[in-house]
Amino acid sequence: TSGTTGKPKGVVHTTGGYNLYSHITLKWAFDLKDTDVYWCTADVGWITGHSYIVYGPLSNGATTLMYEGAPRPSNPGCLWDIVEKYGVNIFYTAPTAIRALIKMGEQHPNARDLSSLRILGTVGEPINPEAWMWYHRVIGGGRCPIVDTWWQTETGGFMLTPLPGAIPTKPGSATFPFPGIIADVVDLEGNPVGVNEGGYLVIKHPWPSMIRTVYGDNNRFRRTYWEHIPPKDGQYLYFAGDGARKDQDGYFWVMGRVDDVINVSGHRLGTMEVESALVSHPAVAEAAVVGRPDDVKGEEVVAFVTLEGDYESSDSLMAELKQHVVKEIGAIARPGEIRFTDGMPKTRSGKIMRRLLRNLASGEEVAGDTSTLEDRSVLDKLRSGV
């Protein structure tokens, strides 16, 4: 696993069930054909690389494209050069990459021929609606369905995903469970919660590619995934560690890790909501929000913000962003502090390591496992306040 919430775990998968599930999920969710050129930009070392760079596309007879590298200031259009050069039909990347591409500007994709693309995908963390809309409009030309997938190393393959052309999408929602997956949103007692009420995302029945144990630690496997929500009448629920809600149409909205919820004066705020509010401001390319202990409110909202290329940090912009969050969500969500930064501490799979930001916001020494941190200099700059 990528180690966003703690020490990375070794996840044990089978061969048959895992292979079957990566095959069928990719075939159905991405309408994959053996004539397709398919490109997933993930690092091949993580589960997305295993399931959806190697086994899924190759078992379906498609052409899979692998690329070592990422857009840099010296070559910001490299991804679109590859799409144009190889005629990529299906493009699958992470919200964090999309936000970085937004920051680089529309001129780069606009200068390339992306007409070969027919389906776009997103993976790794919930995508904020603003990034979804940009991806759909600029990269997909308004014609490509977006497959927003929710799954984990532990699940082996997609758990929640739209099926393109069959399920109408909503920006920011992973829509519905994949056929055969029985998912729900429940409270800590395992009871289903009401419409648009936040709760714990669970899977109620087994599936072919499910985790079989944590490598070398079967007790941790039982404790982490099966006993966090106590079993009822012998019925166990797989709890993934993510919070979610279901809307009035039954669509699932994943709200991020349950430890990414801030309690301000008794109000539970999902960090994703505040981050989306910040990113909806034209000056903001990426935002990460954490809670800091506060004597009066319990917790205070602290935001780390990366600005779009042409904007510069200032006290007036900070005040404007705080007010923007109030306008979008309400006074309860107003950040107590906003820190501008050139980059976020991320794992090599592209996920923001919010637990490190929590340490920094609270003035604590950075603790815990940092072996999967991609660029240590980002953390050093944040520590020194540069």
Image (cartoon, rainbow, N blue to C red):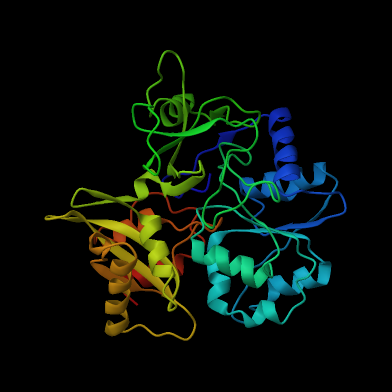
Q: Is residue 216 above or below residue 346?
A: above
Q: Is residue 97 above or below residue 10?
A: below
In this rendering, would 58 be left or right of 241? Answer: right
Spot the residue most to the right. 35
Q: How many marks?
A: 0
Q: Residue at x 56, y 35 (%)?
A: 11
- At which x and y percent is residue 265? 18, 52
Spot the residue most to the top. 233
- At which x and y percent is residue 49? 67, 50
- Residue in the foreground of this view, choosing between 316 and 386: 316
Quadrant of the image occupied by residue 324: bottom left
The C terminus sits in image quarter: bottom left
- Residue in the foreground of this view, choosing between 378 and 293: 293
Residue 173 appears in the figure: yes
- At which x and y percent is residue 238? 48, 29
In this rendering, would 118 be left or right of 74? Answer: right
- Residue in the foreground of this view, choosing between 321 and 230: 321
